Image (cartoon, rainbow, N blue to C red):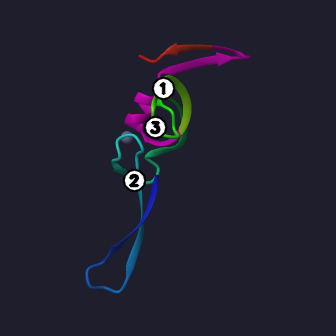
């Protein structure tokens, strides 16, 4: 998630616009370039989304901007492949 912030320079008139990026996973502020943007992850929902009532669990994809640490936790499969033959394994 990108938040545009203003950081003043003391009493100086000049203001510097800084872009503050926050990880959607851990909500930490990180520098530009330290987030992997728009990662689609499967999310296990435990409620329906109209009234928020408990329901049979279901999977829905959501999009997150993630820091490296959270990306590592969110992605559970790794893949290798060539010529249309891919192998998927749980990441170690
Ligand atoms: Zn994070």
Q: Secondary structure at mark 2?
A: loop
Reply above or below: 8 against 61: below
The residue pinned by badge 1 equals: 55
Looking at the rendering, which quadrant does residue 68 occupy?
Answer: top left
Mark 2 and mark 1: span between their CA atoms? 39 Å
Q: Secondary structure at mark 1?
A: strand
Q: Nearer the viewer, residue 10 or 4?
A: 4
**Mark 3 or mark 2, earlier in chain:** 2
- Residue at coordinates 47% horizontally, 22% vertically from top-left? 76
The residue pinned by badge 3 equals: 52
Q: Nearer the viewer, residue 62 or 54?
A: 54
Q: Nearer the viewer, mark 2 or mark 1?
A: 1
Neighbour class for label 1 at 10 Å: few (<14), some, many (≥20)? Answer: few
Looking at the rendering, which quadrant does residue 16 occupy?
Answer: bottom left
Residue 31 circle label: 2
- Residue at coordinates 51% horizontally, 33% vertically from top-left? 48
Q: Which residues are magenta?
A: 63-86
Reply above or below: 31 against 72: below
Q: Name the quadrant of the C terminus.
A: top left
Asked if residue 77 lies left or right of residue 30, the reply is right
Neighbour class for label 2 at 10 Å: few (<14), some, many (≥20)? Answer: few
């Amino acid at each position: 998630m990108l938040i545009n912030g203003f950081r003043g320079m003391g009493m100086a008139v000049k203001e510097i616009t800084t872009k503050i990026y926050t990880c959607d996973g851990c909500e930490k502020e990180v520098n530009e370039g330290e987030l992997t943007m728009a990662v689609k992850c499967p999310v296990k929902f435990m409620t329906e989304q109209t009234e928020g009532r408990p329901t049979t669990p279901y999977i829905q994809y959501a999009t997150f901007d993630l820091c490296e640490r959270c990306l590592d936790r969110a992605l559970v499969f790794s893949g290798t492949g060539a010529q249309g033959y891919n192998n998927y394994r749980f990441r170690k």
